[in-house]
Image (tube, rainbow, N blue to C red):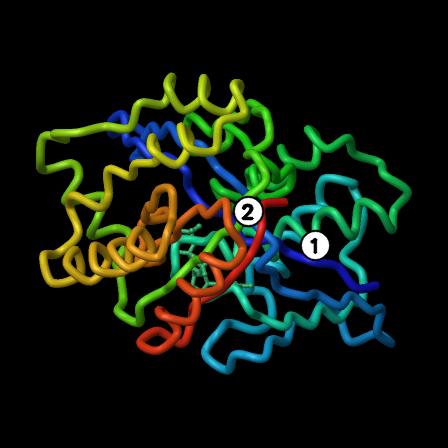
C-alpha cells in the first residue's frame, strides 16, 4: 500500500506560555500543502516491524516516528505488532518546521486504519497520534485548522483560498529547545492576530490571510539566522507574494501567491541559492 504524508505550514504561530508539565501552550493556524513524503507499507515474512528511508541519517527501526505510530496503533487496537516493512521516500526537508516526521507518523496511522477497515474515526485516530507527538493529531486530520494546547486541540477552519505556495528551507540548523528557551526568557513584543486570521479565512480573502501571517519564533531567532529568513521573505515579497512567514520553529520560510507565474519566478530565484525550494498548493 502506498500513501502520502503532506507537509504542514504555520499561517500563524503564537506561544501563550509555559505549562507546569513542561510543554508550552500554543495557538497556531496550520495548513497542509502538496509537498509530501511517499510511504510504502508491505507485510513481510516474520521480520517484525522495519522502517527504511532514503536519508541515511534518519533513524530506522522503532526510533523512526513512523514505527512508533504503527506500534501505538496496534496497541490502541489491542493487537500484537504485525510484521510490516515501511519504506519512506522523504521529500519534506528534515528539521525544517514542516512536521515531516509527524506527517509520516500520521500517514502510517491513516494507512493502518484503512487496512483494518476503519476501526477508528478520524478524531479517535488523532487521539492515538497524540501519543506519538504534539503535531501528529493535526497531521492526521490535515487541511486548515486551529491548533491549541500543545498542538493537539484542533478546530477545523474554512479552507485557505486556492493559491500557490513557495516554501524555501535554508540549510542552517535550528534548535527547537533553544528557541523555546529564548521565548521563555523574553517578553514577546508582537503576536499574530489569530482572531483576525480566522475572520480572513471565513471571508475567503487570500490577501487578508497573507497579510496576517505571523510567527513569534522569528523574533527570537539568533541574529545571523534572522537575517537569512528575512532575506528569503524579502525575495518572496519582491517576486509577488501577498505575504510571507516562517513555519514552526523554522528555518523554512514560505510565501502565498495568487499568480502561478509569479510563484514560479520566486521559486526559480530562490532555487539559485537554496536547493530546498518547493512550489506547492494547499491541500
Ligand atoms: P516540526 O515542524 O514538527 O517541529 P521538524 O520539521 O522540525 O518538525 P522533523 O523533520 O519532523 O522536524 O524531524 C525531527 C526529528 O525527528 C529529527 O531529529 C529526526 O531524526 C526525527 N525523525 C524520526 N522519524 C522521522 C521521520 N520519519 N522523518 C523525519 N524525521 C524523523
Question: x, y (%) of residue 218?
Answer: 22, 46
Q: Quadrant of residue 96?
A: bottom left
Judge the density around disc 1: few (<14), some (14-19), many (≥20) Cα neighbours within 10 Å.
many
Indicate the position of residue 194 as horizontal and vertical percent values: 36, 23
The mark found on residue 132 in the picture is: 2
Q: Is residue 243 left or right of residue 17?
A: right
Residue 35 vs 73, above or below: the answer is below
Identity of the residue drawn at 52% across and 79% down: 55
Q: Which of the two residues, 79 or 104, is positioned nearer the viewer here?
A: 104
Q: Residue at x 45, y 57 (%)?
A: 262
- Judge from the rendering whether residue 87 lies leftward or rightward of residue 231; answer left or right: right
Q: Residue at x 75, y 59 (%)?
A: 3
Residue 94 appears in view: no
User: Compared to 232, does 188 lie above or below?
Assistant: above
Measured as percent of width and height from the top left, residue 35 is found at 57, 59
- Chain-order first, disc 1 or disc 2: 1
Which of the labelled discs sits on residue 155, or is there none? none
Rendered residue at 52%/64% (across/down): 92
Q: Residue at the far bottom: name it.
A: 56
**Tag shown at residue 108:** 1
Amino acid at each position: 500500500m502506498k500513501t502520502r504524508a503532506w507537509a504542514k505550514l504555520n499561517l500563524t504561530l503564537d506561544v501563550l506560555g509555559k505549562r507546569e508539565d513542561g510543554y508550552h501552550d500554543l495557538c497556531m493556524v496550520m495548513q497542509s500543502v502538496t509537498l509530501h513524503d511517499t510511504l510504502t507499507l508491505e507485510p513481510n515474512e516474520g521480520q517484525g516491524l522495519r522502517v527504511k528511508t532514503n536519508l541515511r541519517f534518519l533513524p530506522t527501526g522503532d526510533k523512526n516516528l513512523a514505527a512508533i505510530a504503527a506500534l501505538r496503533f496496534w496497541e490502541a487496537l489491542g493487537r500484537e505488532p504485525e510484521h510490516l516493512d515501511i519504506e519512506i521516500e522523504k521529500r519534506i526537508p528534515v528539521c525544517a518546521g514542516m512536521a515531516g516526521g509527524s506527517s509520516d507518523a500520521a500517514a502510517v496511522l491513516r494507512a493502518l486504519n484503512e487496512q483494518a477497515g476503519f476501526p477508528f474515526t478520524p478524531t479517535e485516530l488523532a487521539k492515538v497520534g497524540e501519543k506519538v507527538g504534539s503535531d501528529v493529531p493535526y497531521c492526521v486530520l490535515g487541511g486548515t485548522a486551529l491548533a491549541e494546547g500543545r498542538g493537539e486541540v484542533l478546530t477545523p477552519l474554512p479552507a485557505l483560498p486556492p493559491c500557490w505556495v513557495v516554501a524555501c528551507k535554508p540549510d542552517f540548523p535550528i534548535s527547537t529547545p533553544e528557541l523555546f528557551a529564548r521565548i521563555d526568557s523574553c517578553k514577546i513584543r508582537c503576536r499574530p492576530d489569530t482572531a483576525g486570521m480566522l475572520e480572513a479565512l471565513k471571508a475567503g480573502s487570500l490577501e487578508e490571510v497573507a497579510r496576517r501571517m505571523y510567527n513569534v519564533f522569528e523574533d527570537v531567532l539568533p541574529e545571523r539566522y534572522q537575517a537569512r529568513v528575512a532575506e528569503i521573505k524579502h525575495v518572496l515579497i519582491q517576486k509577488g507574494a501577498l505575504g510571507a512567514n516562517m513555519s514552526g520553529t523554522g528555518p523554512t520560510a514560505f510565501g502565498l501567491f495568487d499568480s502561478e507565474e509569479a510563484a514560479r519566478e520566486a521559486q526559480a530565484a530562490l532555487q539559485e541559492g537554496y536547493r530546498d525550494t518547493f512550489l506547492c498548493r494547499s491541500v
